[in-house]
Image (cartoon, rainbow, N blue to C red):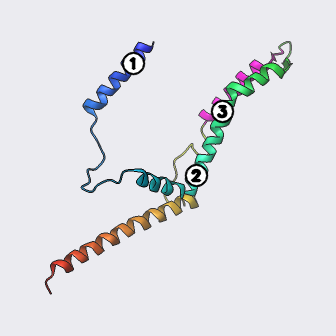
């Protein structure tokens, strides 16, 4: 099995190396490297409050998910008494802690896979986006507008420098 995984990794590496080309645009300017550039990058990410909230939520979810296999499983197996879930006629399924853990995992998987509310149809044209998306679009436009202004100023400076008047 390990040999098969190693072969699959080698094949994937070969395919990527041979048939997939680089898509990053080649720029003529030097890319900043070193600890200071790395720190500036982390500070830029750290200023994004929405990203930090999503990162915190993901970390908390991951922490709870990891506990299912350890603390919750042991506690359910040790302390959950055998119980009858429901009685339907002569059928009365009984579960213990291990079976309840299986039910919890199945319900969790169903909730993860199940589509969320509003995912049945795509958004209609003309429907207003939520405020966070509108804010992101405004920031995007503002940043691109600044880029255009800087390019125009640079072009004006170059024109003035080239004009001998």
Q: Is residue 109 magenta?
A: yes
- Upstream in the sequence, badge 2 or badge 1? 1
Q: Magenta stretch mostly in which secondary structure? A: helix
Question: Would you place residue 116 above or below residue 147 in this image?
Answer: above
Q: Is residue 39 magenta?
A: no
Asked whether 32 or 27 is in front, the reply is 32
Q: Quadrant of residue 72?
A: top right
Q: Is residue 85 visible?
A: no
Mark 1 and mark 3: Cα distance apart in space: 29 Å
Quadrant where the N terminus is found in the figure? top left
Callout 2: few (<14), some (14-19), or many (20+) C-alpha neighbours within 10 Å? few
User: Which residue appears at 31% of the width and 31% of the height?
Assistant: 16
Is disc 3 placed on a helix, strand or loop? helix
Chain part drawn in magenta: 92-114
For label 1, the residue is: 6
For label 3, the residue is: 65
For label 2, the residue is: 52
Q: Quadrant of residue 165?
A: bottom left
């Amino acid at each position: 099995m390990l040999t098969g995984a190693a072969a699959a990794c080698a094949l994937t590496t070969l395919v990527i190396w041979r048939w997939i080309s680089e898509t990053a645009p080649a720029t003529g300017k030097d890319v900043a490297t070193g600890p200071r550039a790395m720190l500036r990058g982390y500070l830029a990410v750290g200023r994004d409050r929405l990203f930090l909230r999503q990162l915190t939520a993901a970390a908390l979810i991951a922490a709870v998910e990891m506990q299912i296999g350890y603390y919750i499983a042991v506690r359910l197996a040790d302390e959950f008494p055998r119980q009858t879930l429901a009685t339907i006629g002569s059928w009365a399924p009984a579960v213990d802690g291990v079976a309840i853990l299986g039910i919890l995992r199945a319900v969790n998987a169903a909730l993860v896979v199940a589509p969320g509310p509003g995912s049945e149809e795509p958004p209609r044209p003309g429907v207003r986006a939520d405020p966070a998306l509108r804010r992101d679009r405004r920031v995007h436009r503002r940043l691109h507008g600044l880029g255009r202004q800087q390019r125009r100023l640079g072009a004006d400076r170059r024109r003035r420098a080239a004009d001998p008047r």
